[in-house]
């Protein structure tokens, strides 16, 4: 059983089938070479370290750990352990698909069976197509006509009842993979906000159902409210299947909150479908007219954005949440992404790369589809002229300023009215709150109005040239 992005025993179709057919050698391979440009970022490696530790514990410490080219390692294990068949759940990154196709063929050449299963998506991307057989490019018909009219998602299966495990004496230790930093241990405070692994993922889902689902439809937009599941890293690593989340939430009854949550899982499906059908999504504008966009790519502004020192409080709160917890609330992801692309005029791929390195839930499909959505260059994207105003967004979605105060403590004493745009507060108000702009907190790196106008003017030139 080759574990990849399905680090769980419950509702694991490949493991289920393997366990039914014989003794099982559980394997994990760190294959950085195949991933190329998209080899795991720093935060992902840290999560993986902890997730493998949990998985290994649930497999009686028999998880066989390896690093290198997957095909070579599988071949070697097949030689030494009298293996008849290899089982895995499918992954959808273009590089995984290429690698797995080759492995399937090469195993077949030596009469080893290769069995792959659907374990990470509710619907396979090649199953949800328009009547003419082409992929959907717009979310609503994809979800409503394509997904909801297709077969209902598989109901989750329990852990295999019997699992006879084979141990491999030549396994590396998880520590040998060097997934966590060796010197400056930045990972330790970061992972503290999370519990990792299959059991933790189930607890998180149950907790969300008890304490977050009611009010999800509206509350999911407010970063200080409890109405989000925070399941995204667990889903990315397959510590829980989307089927488990879908069915557990549906079992609570019918409501707008349930429908909205399931539709968000639907966005995850849509992103994966886009990546499957348009494998260049992470690197190329989906709408090619954006290729001519005159990005400024001003490095000082990019650095201020990354560090949460842009001088715009909601942006800095979001970027510091990311830096301190490896996560950022969805509403704030949209605001910081819009600011990077449409106020700083920095190429969305710079933001995509930063998120890739820093998010615990960094996911090639969701990350690239979402960045292109915000930039306006994607499929079914936000219109280019929708530039989120970070001040009005913060007033609306962080009305008490709790989120900003949590992550930008140097502004905590400002009255809420002045918290969202401190640069227009009077010097008396700033002084009373111990804020010195340009010293204790930066001046904004750009003028919001002028930068918005400059971006819209640049978009207009694209429209003319299209
Ligand atoms: P909930 O609101 O509880 O939603 C439940 C699940 O539905 C999520 O765990 C996620 O799997 C899925 N989901 C929710 N919203 C979206 C969405 N907009 N698109 C796709 N799936 C969604 N999500 C990632 O998992 N990995 C990424 O790398 C990623 N990068 C993003 C980059 C940008 C610029 C933006 C705007 C969004 C990105 N998202 C990404 C989508 C979304 O922000 C996260 O999935 C969500 O914030 C996770 O929090 P949650 O689990 O509490 O979500």
Image (tube, grey):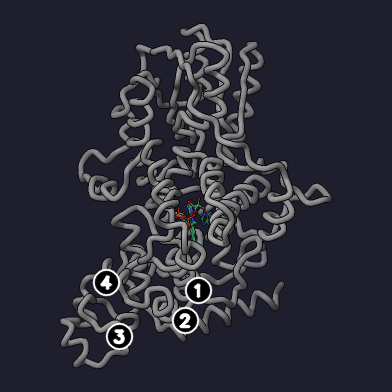
Alpha carbon distance from label 4 to label 3: 12 Å
User: Which residue matches tag 1?
Assistant: 342
Label 4 CB less than 8 angstroms from ligand 1: no
Q: On the picture, is 151 further left or further right than 192?
A: right
Sequence-wise first label, 2 or 3: 3
Q: On the picture, is 296 further left or further right than 112?
A: left
User: Which residue matches tag 2?
Assistant: 451
Mark 4–mark 2 CB contact (< 8 Å): no
Label 3 CB less than 8 angstroms from ligand 1: no
In the displayed image of the protein, which residue is found farthest to the front? 253
Give the SS element for disc 2: helix
User: Which residue matches tag 4?
Assistant: 405
Q: For the residues carrying marks 2 and 3, which lies nearer the camera in this image?
A: 3
Alpha carbon distance from label 1 to label 3: 24 Å
Q: On the picture, is 215 further left or further right than 444?
A: right
- Is 396 or 137 nearer to us in this picture? 396
Give the SS element for disc 4: helix
Give the SS element for disc 1: helix
Up/down of 88 relative to 334, above or below: above
- Image coordinates of residue 3 in percent, x first then y, are 48, 28
Answer with the quarter of the image where residue 61 lies: top left
Sequence-wise first label, 2 or 1: 1
Alpha carbon distance from label 2 to label 3: 22 Å
Sequence-wise first label, 1 or 4: 1
User: Which residue matches tag 3?
Assistant: 418
């Amino acid at each position: 059983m080759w574990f990849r992005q399905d680090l769980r025993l419950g509702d694991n179709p490949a493991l289920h089938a393997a366990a039914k057919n014989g003794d099982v050698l559980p394997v994990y391979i760190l294959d950085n070479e195949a991933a190329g440009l998209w080899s795991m970022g720093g935060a992902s490696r840290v999560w993986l370290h902890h997730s493998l530790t949990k998985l290994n514990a649930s497999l009686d410490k028999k998880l066989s750990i390896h690093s290198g080219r997957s095909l070579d390692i599988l071949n070697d294990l097949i030689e030494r352990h009298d293996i008849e068949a290899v089982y895995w759940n499918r992954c959808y990154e273009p590089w995984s698909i290429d690698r797995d196709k080759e492995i399937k063929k090469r195993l077949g050449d030596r009469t080893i069976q290769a069995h792959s299963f659907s374990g990470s998506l509710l619907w396979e991307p090649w199953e949800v197509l328009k009547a003419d057989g082409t992929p959907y490019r717009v979310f609503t018909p994809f979800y409503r006509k394509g997904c909801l009219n297709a077969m209902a998602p598989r109901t989750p299966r329990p852990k295999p009842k019997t699992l006879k495990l084979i141990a491999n004496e030549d396994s590396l230790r998880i520590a040998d993979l060097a997934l966590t930093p060796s010197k400056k241990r930045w990972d330790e405070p970061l992972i503290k906000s999370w519990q990792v692994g299959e059991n933790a993922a189930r607890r998180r889902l149950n907790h969300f159902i008890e304490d977050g689902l009611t009010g999800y439809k509206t509350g999911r937009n407010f970063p200080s409210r409890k109405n989000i599941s925070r399941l995204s890293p667990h889903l990315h690593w397959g510590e829980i299947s989307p089927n488990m989340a879908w069915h557990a939430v549906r079992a609570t009854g019918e409501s707008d909150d349930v429908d909205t949550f399931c539709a968000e899982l639907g966005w995850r499906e849509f992103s994966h479908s886009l990546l499957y059908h348009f494998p260049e999504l992470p690197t190329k504008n989906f709408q090619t007219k954006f290729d001519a966009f005159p990005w400024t790519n001003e490095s000082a502004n990019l650095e201020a954005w990354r560090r949460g020192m842009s001088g715009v409080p909601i942006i800095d709160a979001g970027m510091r949440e990311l830096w301190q917890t490896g996560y950022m609330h969805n509403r704030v992801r949209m605001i910081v992404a819009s600011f990077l692309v449409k106020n700083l005029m920095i190429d969305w791929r710079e933001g995509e790369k930063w998120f890739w390195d820093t998010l615990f839930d960094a996911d090639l499909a969701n990350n690239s589809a979402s960045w292109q959505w915000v930039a306006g260059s994607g499929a079914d994207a936000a219109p280019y002229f929708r530039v989120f105003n970070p001040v009005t967004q913060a007033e609306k979605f962080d009305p008490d300023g709790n989120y900003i105060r949590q992550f930008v403590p140097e502004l905590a004493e400002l009255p809420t009215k002045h918290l969202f745009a401190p640069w227009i507060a009077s010097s008396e108000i700033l002084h009373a709150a111990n804020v010195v702009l340009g010293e204790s907190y930066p001046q904004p790196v750009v003028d919001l109005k002028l930068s918005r106008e400059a971006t819209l003017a640049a978009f207009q030139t694209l429209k003319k040239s299209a």
